[in-house]
Amino acid sequence: MVEELTQAEDAIAACADTATWAQPEGELVAALDTAHRIEQRLAAVKLALIRELDGRGTATAHGASSTAVWLRERLRLTIPAARRLVDLAEALDTGNPGVRHALADGHIAVDQARVIADTVDSVQTAAGPEAADKALGVLVEWAGQFDPTLLRKLSTRILDHVAPDIADAAAQAALDAEARRATRDRHLTLSTLTDGRLRLTGILDTETAGLLRAAIDPLSAPSGPDDQRSPGQRRHDALSDVCRLALRTGELPEHGGDPAQIVVTTSYDGLTRQLGRGALDTGLRLTPEAVRRLACDAAILPAVLSGAGQPLDLGRQRRLITGPLRRALVLRDGGCAFPGCDRPPRWCDAHHIKHWADGGDTSLANAVLLCGHHHRHLHHSDWAVRLAGDGHPEFVPPAWLDPEQVPRRNHYHRRT
């Protein structure tokens, strides 16, 4: 086998040295089809080798804990990729041999083989070997027309074609099995990175996935023509807004005997003079700019400490924009007041126009509603906000955006 593979490698190397620009288009297309077919046939050989080595315990003999770990080192793969190879090699060896032959003949691709192997195995369990053979023929034919994603969608109704008498019952059983699998596999992992950020990984069941999308999709749209955030950044900020809304409702269960809240700790000098850093009650560090921005929101309680670390004030009510004052602010602004933003009041923070730490008072004349994105934007950009003569907020753009710096208003919310 090694000799034959070496000869094939030499032939492929010769092809790699051929100038493709000199080839006619028809030959290039034919060569692409042939290269793809060879790639799949080599994949079948590779999987057969992996299955045999796995069965012999070669990985353990070489000191690895599993074949997947051994493949990671040997072939420089990721562990998930190595595990997928081992699993597929086993499935092709122990399942319907027709799937392995279809891959070896170059009729299907590796990712299609995964779909077909899973489907044929399910059909054999539900309807027996004869129906499984029929399913194999149908799926291989479909594989010539559809990519793996669409093939998997089509495969969910394969029994309609090969065993229609049991298709409905099997579909219901598959749906029930999928629901059980979703319940079993659901999880969310929060991994703290070395710099204090958080990595989220997990799998949401269908219902929770729908809830999450319903919550963050409306908040993930660009907030205006000047919104330069990437889609991933917009989804991140939308999740932040959802969490803020949940904290603001006051309906979350108590945590350690206290209402659900974020406690930000900083020194008084750090808050007033923008020196030092702040810390969340989880121990994570915040920049002074982030502390000052968080200190605007009524759902965030600042713990201001003296130089000796003694509490001077915790959640000072005359600073927080709550109750009647927030209701008046909602009536005046109607939602995020930044020009062009349509975020409703429940998604908004109450921002001190002149920062409380800089001596600004807590009053309707010194407050404006801002959504999470525009609250951050205002704290980290050259935009300025002020109240116009009629008592409504207006925003002055930076000179690089508008040399005339003509004040702008939000005309989305109806004024009352």
Image: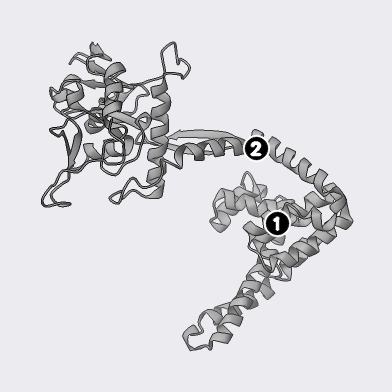
What amino acid is labelled 2 in the image?
Ala
Residue at 54%, 86% in the rendered image: 25
Q: Is mark 1 on a helix, strand or loop?
A: helix
Q: In this view, does 262 lie to the left or right of 124?
A: left
- Nearer to the camera, 202 or 254: 254
Q: Is mark 2 on a helix, strand or loop?
A: helix
Residue at 29%, 26% in the rendered image: 331
348 shown above or below 317 = below
10 Å neighbourhood of mark 1: few (<14), some, or many (≥20)?
Answer: few
**In which quadrant will I find the N terminus?**
bottom right
- Toward which corner of the image does residue 131 lie, by quadrant? bottom right
Structural distance between the alpha carbons of marks 2 and 1: 20 Å
Residue 177: image x %, image y %?
73, 39
Residue at 23%, 38% in the rendered image: 378
The label on residue 182 is 2
- Nearer to the camera, 412 or 104: 412
- Toward which corner of the image does residue 207 lie, by quadrant? top right
383 shown above or below 308 = below
The label on residue 154 is 1
- Toward which corner of the image does residue 104 lie, by quadrant? bottom right
Question: Disc 2 or disc 1, which is closer to the eye?
Answer: 1
289 shown above or below 226 = above
**What is the image's colouring?**
one colour
Q: Is residue 358 left or right of residue 376?
A: left
Residue 149: image x %, image y %?
62, 57
What amino acid is labelled 1 in the image?
Leu
Q: Can residue 264 be seen in this view?
A: no
**In which quadrant will I find the C terminus?**
top left
